[in-house]
Image (tube, rainbow, N blue to C red):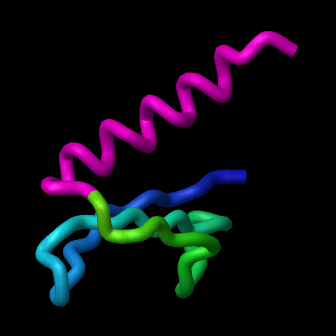
Amino acid sequence: MMIRIEARADAATGLFFLEVFMPADAAQPYVSTAPRYATAAAAEQDVIASISAAANRPR
């Protein structure tokens, strides 16, 4: 199953948050983070680091 991750700007705070869509073509996000990132790039790097850490966790 494919997912789609999008960084969005929060109009109220000026910070970015992430929306995770599952499946990738879903109209509404499966889950969203709180707006806590200064840039879209920081949000994207954080989710990549989280996925990488989970994938590399000993089983």
Residue farthest to the top? 58
Left or right side of 59 for 8: left
Q: Give the overall secondary structure of the magenta segment.
A: helix
Nearer the observer, 1 or 30: 30
Nearer the observer, 3 or 30: 30
What residue appears at the point 44 percent right and 43 percent down from the top-left corner? 47
**What span is colored magenta in the figure?**
37-59
Displayed quadrant of residue 46? top left
What residue appears at the point 59 percent right and 71 percent down from the top-left corner? 31
Residue 16, horizontal then vertical, whole percent: 24, 66
Residue 58, horizontal then vertical, whole percent: 79, 11
What residue appears at the point 87 percent right and 15 percent down from the top-left corner? 59
Residue 12, horizontal then vertical, whole percent: 18, 88
What residue appears at the point 66 percent right and 15 percent down from the top-left corner? 56
Up the image or down, 38 lies above or below 49; here it is: below
Residue farthest to the right? 59
Residue 44, horizontal then vertical, whole percent: 32, 46
Left or right side of 21 for 43: left
Up the image or down, 44 lies above or below 27; here it is: above
Q: Is residue 55 magenta?
A: yes
